[in-house]
Image (cartoon, grey):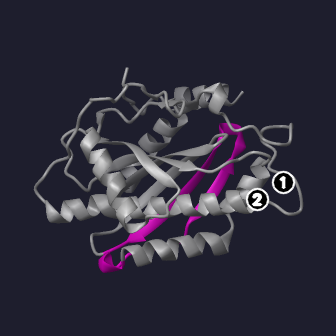
């Protein structure tokens, strides 16, 4: 049912052109990046992931793929695919909704991110989240201000059994609205292999957002999601830092290991 809804959404947004299908067998997902976007080289992805690890060594997430428009300047619009390790066993969409809207742990994580990048005057605006069980995802948005410019991010988070796969789209604030439909169309194309799909503990209408108990989400789920959300902010700063250090450079692209068909 979720797959049919996504197909309908892609068809109804056919005026937004997409590129070729990208597939990741390790984490069991595929999606179509915006038309004209290309995969980053393996070395750039590795450096991005290692840079975050150097500032947040206790993280429970990693960045596995990166994309941006071909020949676009570093620091423009881009996508980073993030995998956050967190078990969803015994949880429901209601539990996920409570976890993603848990104000205190989320704010704590974001303040930790700001501290990790204090040298860049990082300031995170208000996070907003929408749980969409019928599409198998959570959508979050956040404005970010820093010494390297204003950005807007929209994050499509797809729960699985043992991890969350997140499509983190970013664009400069001035051009974000022109990219929004392309980001949404790309996210609508996302599909998860059956063996990796999140299964709600309550067997009911997939659109029903309810919790398994009055206790709400497990501490492990809450902590895992909060930890993963800090990545939404830190990764934005990395690319903007590179644009500041190399203002005339262009993004490095490669299809090596890209699994694009």
> Residue 156: x and y, percent?
54, 47
Q: Is residue 177 left or right of residue 223?
A: left
State the image coordinates of residue 225 (x, y, percent, origin top left).
61, 58
Q: Residue at x 77, y 55 (%)?
A: 95
- The C terminus lies in which quarter of the figure? top left
Rate crowding at label 1 as few (under 14), some (14 to 19) or many (20 or more) other CA atoms within 10 Å: many
Q: Secondary structure at mark 1?
A: loop
| Nearer-the-camera pick, 141 or 58 | 58
Give yes or no for residue 123 being in the magenta stretch. yes
**Which comes sooner in the sequence, label 1 or label 2?**
1
Above or below, comparing residue 71 to residue 243 in the picture: above
Q: Where are the magenta residues, as a range?
A: 118-146
Where is mark 1, residue-wise?
A: 211
Residue at the top extreme, as displayed = 261
Percent from the top left, x then y, of residue 194?
65, 26
Identify the mark at residue 11; answer none if there is no mark.
Answer: none
**Cα–Cα span, label 1 and label 2:** 11 Å
Q: Is residue 125 visible?
A: no
Tell whether label 2 touches label 1 (CB within 8 Å). Answer: no
**Image disc number at residue 218:** 2
Residue drawn at (42%, 25%) of the image:
21
- Residue 14 position, x and y percent, is 47, 28
Image quarter hosting the N terminus: top right
The total of numbered circles placed on residues is 2
Horizontal side, residue 245 vs residue 162: left or right: left
For label 2, count other residues whose C-alpha is less than 10 Å away and answer few (under 14), some (14-19) or many (20+): some
Residue at 42% x, 48% y is 63
Image-based side of 202 in relation to 252, left or right: right
Is residue 139 shown in magenta?
yes
Assign a secondary structure to mark 2.
loop
Q: Residue furthest left?
A: 248
């Amino acid at each position: 049912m979720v797959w049919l809804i996504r197909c309908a959404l892609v068809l109804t947004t056919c005026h937004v052109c997409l590129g070729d299908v990208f597939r990741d067998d390790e984490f069991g997902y595929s999606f179509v990046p915006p038309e004209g976007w290309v995969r980053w080289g393996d070395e750039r992805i590795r450096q991005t992931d290692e840079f975050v690890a150097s500032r947040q060594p206790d993280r429970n997430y990693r960045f596995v793929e990166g994309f941006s428009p071909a020949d676009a300047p570093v620091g423009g619009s881009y996508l980073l695919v993030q995998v956050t390790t967190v078990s969803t066993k015994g949880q429901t969409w209601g539990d996920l909704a409570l976890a993603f809207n848990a104000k205190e742990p989320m704010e704590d994580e974001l303040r930790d991110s700001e501290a990790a990048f204090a040298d860049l005057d990082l300031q995170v605006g208000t996070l907003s989240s929408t749980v969409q069980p019928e599409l198998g995802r959570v959508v979050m948005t956040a404005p970010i201000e820093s010494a390297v410019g204003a950005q807007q991010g929209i994050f499509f988070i797809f729960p699985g059994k043992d991890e969350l796969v997140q499509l983190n789209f970013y664009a400069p604030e001035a051009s974000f609205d022109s990219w929004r439909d392309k980001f949404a169309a790309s996210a609508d194309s996302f599909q998860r292999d059956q063996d990796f799909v999140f299964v709600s503990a309550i067997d009911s209408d997939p659109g029903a957002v309810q919790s398994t108990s009055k206790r709400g989400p497990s501490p492990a789920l809450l902590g895992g999601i909060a930890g993963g959300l800090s990545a939404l902010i830190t990764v934005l700063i990395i690319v903007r830092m590179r644009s500041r250090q190399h203002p005339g450079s262009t993004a490095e692209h490669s299809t090596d290991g890209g699994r694009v068909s």
